[in-house]
Amino acid sequence: MEGGGTIGGARTDGGMTIGSGGDTIDACPSADMAGGWAGGCGQERQNDVASGVEVRRHRHGAQAHAIWREVFQAPTFVCAPMVLQSERAFRMLVRRHGCGAAWSPMAKAMCWDTQRAQVLEDLSGCPEDRPLVCQLCAVGVDEVVAAALDVQAHCDAVCLNLGCPQRTAAAAGFGAFLMDRPALVREMVSALAAALHVPVFAKIRVLPKLADTLAFVRMLEAAGCSLVTVHGRTRDNTHHGGPCDWWAIRACVDAVCIPVVANGGVYTLAAAHECLRVTGAVAVMGAGGLLRNPRMFNPAPSAVAGASVESVAGANDCGPIALAREYLRVAEAYPPPIRCVRDHLLALLRTEIKTAGEAMYNMFVRQQRVRYRPQFCLLVSTLAAILGIETPLACCLNNIKHWQPGAVTSGLEGTAGLVCRCGVGCFGNAGGAQVQAPCSHQGDREEDALLSIFDD
Ligand SMILES: Cc1cc2nc3c(=O)[nH]c(=O)nc-3n(C[C@H](O)[C@H](O)[C@H](O)COP(=O)(O)O)c2cc1C
């Protein structure tokens, strides 16, 4: 099998109690769906209830598959939710290359007041960016319903994040840590299903015991979830890497009637087909593989749907530089926050940046965060050199809001000259004080600063 999607063989069947957080659920989907048995009515009554529940389960599954076919057009490949990385520009890029649907980055329902404007800007006003799933994380029922009601007009489904393994998620109890609280998750999903006119999806990680994972997906289905994405790694694997248990995903597919999307460990098109074959999922969701190669799902990159020849110049060249330039072209049409651009360029050009020097690599790849303007200047000049573009460093960098005060000179020594576009010469020769000097030119938007650097 190609692409590093190791299929773990671990199949553990013991244990019907999910998680460690106190909530327990019965692994029997029928009992779960009925909201408890109609107690004490004897075996016959139980059988009646169970068969009624099964009928409803199959009906719900059929409806969910119909939504997948009719609203989503049953895509084989989809783009994962990725914080700062599945923004509109990237979604539009991967849609050109075989992704039939995309998930927006996780938005925090518990900070909705501060997130709302940015999330709605990313979701709304772009009919070509559909089908689109808006992903939310939350710790409470009311907050997730309120946020979902706000976004539902701009997407085709709302997805509850049950997979985030990060420390912040552990501390607040959202993402993968909600899987410890199935009763709360059930309440969230059923409240969402009752309140929304778009379907409710969920994205989970596998639990250490297969039986627990299966009980959890059945619970989701019973609560009204219309599609579940299963990431075949446990939450202990915080870096989205390493072995991925496609057999556990297969077991989920077999356990529920609703569509299941397989996620994890797919880094090539061949691996994606293998994942589909092994799991029997309706689709494969790509994340890390797409960041490194947005054309990963495109069998014939030159035959790009809906893109002009010019816009896919170098379409047969799947090298990182061609990919970075294509991303930047799309980003010009759909300007993203500057941090998204930076992270995409770093994901695509990691090797090139590394060969540009250890200082660059340490600053931008290991530490990742670019906090000081001189760091950014160095990044820009290096990237421009890598991309083979002259370095007219846009002086509207001054307008970028994220710069923090403080001189950082380390790594700047020996930097190539950075030329100020407006002629004021504020960045005349990169190096300490001159890079810090103010500029009179005002850019309109912070992202223009970066994008205009790559005009050629
Ligand atoms: C940069 C980055 C950001 C991510 N952000 C999210 C997110 O917002 N929501 C989510 O459910 N998963 C998120 N993930 C996890 C991915 O959606 C996916 O489940 C994981 O990377 C495994 O898929 P892969 O093996 O194809 O990378 C993120 C992953 C990466 C690499």
Image: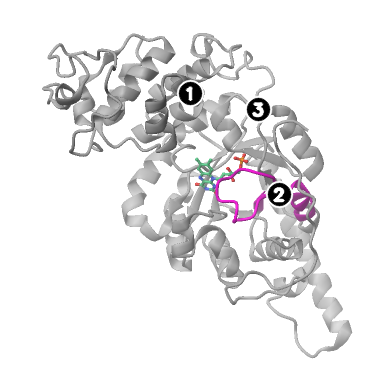
Quadrant of the image for the C terminus? top left
* Residue 450 position in % (x across, y down): 32, 24
Q: Position of residue 356 (x, y in %)?
A: 42, 19
Q: In the picture shown, does residue 321 fall above or below 296?
A: above
Side (left or right) of 279 relative to 162: right
- Residue found at the far right of this picture: 44
Q: Taking 225 as reference, is 251 left or right?
A: right
Quarter of the image where one finds residue 445? top left
* Residue at the image position 68 percent from the left and 76 percent from the top: 35
Element assignment for label 3:
loop
Going from N to C along the chain, the mark reached first, 2 or 1, is 2
Which quadrant of the figure shows ligand 1? Answer: top right
Q: Which residue is mark 3?
A: 297
What residue is pinned by disc 2?
Answer: 260
Amino acid at pointer 3? Phe
Q: Residues within 10 Å of mark 3 (few under 14, many from 20)?
A: many
- Start-end of magenta stretch: 227-252
